Amino acid sequence: MTTAPWVEVFGNARPVEIEIGPGRGDVLLAYAAARPDTNFFGIERLAPLAGVIVAAATARGLSNVQAIGGDARCILAVLLPDACVQAYHVYFPDPWPKTRQRKRRLFHGGTLAADMARTLVPGGAVHLASDLPGLVEQMATALRAAGLQQEGEAISPPAWPRTKYERRYAISGTHRTSLHRP
């Protein structure tokens, strides 16, 4: 496993899990508080929200949290070496439902899925959730095409906290799945 970039970020070589699109960091901060032996890194498209996450982590005394603002596709492709991430979490990404918005979809084109597979450690996982079953299937299809294996339906990471979005809007239920790097 490559830890080089994470030692620079966190000051230690503990395993790293990344949440893509953490918003204000509800899930990321809950995981970090429950699992101080793991580092958590958020990649939020909106830089001010990344700052909110870091400020909240500091206020709570969580030294195992960092976040950055930017496009996850670019960050994974350019900044992360192979086999350096224990798990990815992608919960309730914006579906960009209109055809003209297709290029904005997180998994459009397959490059993000390929970089996620490349940067996962052997046995590492990608956890997905959305209130839109078709969106979960699109993401899972891209990840399977990148070489990940699906473990089954409705598998979620242990003690998965509910996002603010899920509590408010997932009236029809949450669809979850996990895929693993062999």
Image: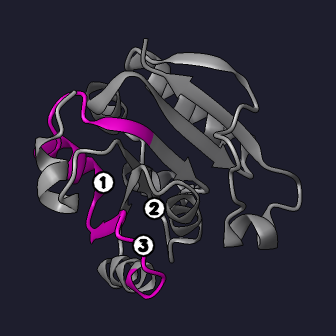
- Residue annotated with mark 3: 62
Q: Is residue 19 above or below residue 46?
A: above
Q: Position of residue 75 (x, y in %)?
A: 21, 52
User: Could one spot residue 7 in this view of the protein?
Assistant: yes
> Which region of the structure is painted magenta?
58-87
- Residue annotated with mark 2: 21
Q: Amino acid at mark 2?
A: Gly
Q: Give whichever of discs 3 and 2 has the lower sequence position.
A: 2
Q: Element at badge 1?
A: helix
Q: Element at badge 2?
A: loop
User: Taking 89 as reference, is 18 left or right?
Assistant: left
1 or 3: mark nearer the eye: 3
Distance between mark 3 and mark 2 Cα atoms? 19 Å
Q: Quadrant of residue 53?
A: bottom left
Graded by Cα atoms within 10 Å as few (under 14), some (14 to 19) or many (20 or more), the crowding at tag 1 reads many
Graded by Cα atoms within 10 Å as few (under 14), some (14 to 19) or many (20 or more), the crowding at tag 2 reads many
Residue shown at the point (50%, 22%) measured from the top left: 180
User: Taking 69 as reference, is 132 left or right?
Assistant: right
- Residue annotated with mark 1: 72
Residue shown at the point (59%, 59%) measured from the top left: 34
Q: How is the image coloured?
A: one colour
Q: Quadrant of residue 111?
A: top left
User: Taking 26 as reference, is 49 left or right?
Assistant: left
Q: Quadrant of residue 112?
A: top left
Q: Amino acid at mark 1?
A: Ala
